[in-house]
Structures are given as structure tokens and as C-alpha cells.
Image (tube, rainbow, N blue to C red):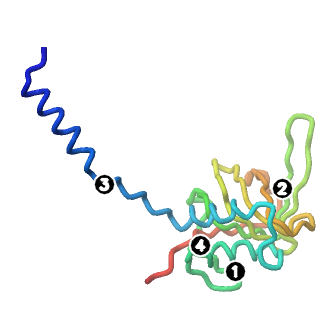
Amino acid sequence: MKSPAFTLLAATFLVAGADLPAAAAEPKSPGQAVADYARKQEGKKVGSGECWDLAAAALDETGCAWTRPRDFGRALDLKKDALRPGDILQFENVTLKWRRGNRFGTIRLGFPQHTAIVLAADGASVEVAHQNYNNVRKVGTLTLNLAEITAGKVAAYRPVAKES
């Protein structure tokens, strides 16, 4: 049987804990804010519908620092840096050749250039949001395996907050 002192002590902690303010939510990283913005635009035309308009609007709306036309943040080294949500990819004359069982195909991105925002990444597999792909000027998503690139190059940028 618990002593009355223990019960009183436990009750004091429970009542005292009820008066504590709720913990403040962690602020989103600039990249997560960019990814969230891009996801909310799915099915919509952003700006004039050009591929880079989505990245420009996402960076502007989330208060990120960048320089037009295509300096989208801190340049990444794709051999060393893992991609994260909100990273911006710049494809230049990229061809991907894929095979899944008896199905196969080719994806071309960026002739000459195409811009996309990473929504999710797992190793070489990335889900991106982009627009002006296959002549569709609305935001859509596409999952790519960057290990399947057979030609071209990809540059990656990590969004950074503006300095106050």
C-alpha cells in the first residue's frame, strides 16, 4: 500500500504539470517549408507555368535567400550530400532509362534545363514536384531513380533562410 505522502507528492506533480504551457512547435527548416509549399500547389499553375516558376515562388513565399535566375540556395555535392525535402534540382539534358520487370522506358528532363523540388528522398529514389513537364503547365509529382541517369547532369541546391 502506498503511503499518504507518496500519493500527495504524485498528485502535486500531476496538478503542477497541468499548468505548464504547451511546448512550442519546432520551426520548420527552410527546405521543409519549400517542400510543403510545393505539395500544396499540386494541380495548380504557379506563375506562368514555367518549371522554374514553382521553385521561385516556393523560395519567395517561404522567405528563402536566392539569386535569379537559378541560384536556388547552397549548392550541394550529390556524391556527398543526401537529398532532403525542399532541395531544388536543376536537370540539364538528362536522360533516365528504367526497367521494372518486363516494362522499361526513358524519361527526358531538361532539354536544355528543367527545375524540380524534392518532396521526399530515399537514397537515389526521389519524389519531386514540378511543372511544365510533357507540356502540362500545372504542378505534378514524379518519382525518379537518379541512379538510372544515363546522360546529362543534375545540380542540387538546399534552400537557406534570408539573414535578418
* Residue underneath mark 3: 21
Q: From the image, state whether disc 4 or disc 1 is nearer to you.
A: 1
* Residue underneath mark 1: 70
Distance between mark 1 and mark 2 Cα atoms: 23 Å
Q: Is residue 20 left or right of residue 88?
A: left
Distance between mark 4 and mark 1 Cα atoms: 11 Å
Q: Give above or below for 123 relative to 137.
A: above
Residue type at numbered disc 4: Ala
Q: Is residue 96 left or right of residue 70?
A: right
Image position, residue 34 (x, y; %): 61, 66
The answer to which of 114 and 117 lies nearer the viewer is 117
Where disc 1 sits, the SS reads loop
Residue type at numbered disc 1: Arg
Residue type at numbered disc 2: Leu
Could you say which disc has been placed on residue 75 in the image? 4
Image position, residue 106 (x, y; %): 90, 54
Where disc 2 sits, the SS reads strand
Where disc 4 sits, the SS reads strand
Residue type at numbered disc 3: Pro
Image position, residue 47 (x, y; %): 78, 78
* Residue underneath mark 2: 96
